[in-house]
Image: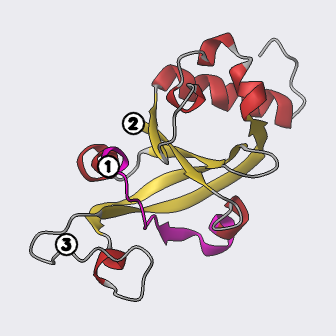
Amino acid sequence: MKYWLFKSEPSTYSIDDMARDGVTAWTGVRNYQARNFMRDEMSRGDRGLFCHSSCEQPGIAGIIEIARAAYPDETQFDRKSRYYDRGATRAAPRWFNVDVKFIRKTRVLGLAELRGQKALKDMQVLQRGNRLSITPVTAAEWKFIMELAACRAFAVPTSC
């Protein structure tokens, strides 16, 4: 199993939208590296962190799961879509998406709080200049974040 972090602006699509929808296609990714993560590395059952970005309180807001492996992003073929790509064809699609499934909301683990954790010092999303909407998360980072979310969310002693 691999772990991922997906960023979304809550004014566009929030963890509450994800909870309401249950499953959604993660469309509109127009960065080749993020596309390659979805197309080449994600598998059904992988887990993800849903992160709010470009908002008042950016940070991890929930847990999601890959529900369907990569397939061509239909928005690239839709002339009315802001994600339309006139160079993409059905025979040679340029852009892909995965379906993600809501698992649960967490308290918001703010970026400032995450940056203050030694165990997360190398986490890609926390690096200066990182702008990718999808980044890998190591198993150790995932475990630490799950413990951090559980400790604070359920008032477990800080020694957990």
How far from the left and from the top, in percent, is residue 89?
Answer: 15, 76
Q: Verify CB contact (< 8 Å) between mark 1 and mark 3.
A: no
Report the amino acid beneath label 3: Gly
Residue 40 locus on image (x, y percent): 23, 47
Q: Residue at x 78, y 43 (%)?
A: 108
**First reached walking from the N terminus: tag 1 or tag 2:** 2
Picture coordinates of residue 97, whole percent (x, y): 35, 63
Answer with mark 3 or mark 2, whichever residue precedes in sequence.
Answer: 2
| Residue nearer the viewer, 82 or 11 | 82
Give the SS element for disc 2.
loop
The residue that mark 1 highlights is 43
Q: Which residue is mark 3?
A: 87
Q: Position of residue 127 (x, y in %)?
A: 55, 25
In the picture, the disc for residue 2 is 2
Q: Amino acid at mark 2?
A: Lys
Q: Nearer the viewer, mark 1 or mark 3?
A: 3
Q: Amino acid at mark 1?
A: Ser
- Work out how far the residue at label 1 is from the one at label 2, CA to CA, in angstroms: 8 Å
Circles 1 and 2: CB distance less than 8 Å? yes
Quadrant showing the N terminus: top left
State whether residue 81 is above or below residue 38. below
Secondary-structure class at tag 1:
loop
Identify the magenta region. Answer: 18-34
Q: Is residue 62 placed above or below 116 in the rendered structure?
A: below
> Helix or strand or loop: what does disc 3 sit on?
loop
**Camera-nearest label, 3 or 2:** 3
The reply, left or right, for residue 137 in relation to residue 102 is left
Q: Nearer the viewer, residue 154 or 139?
A: 139
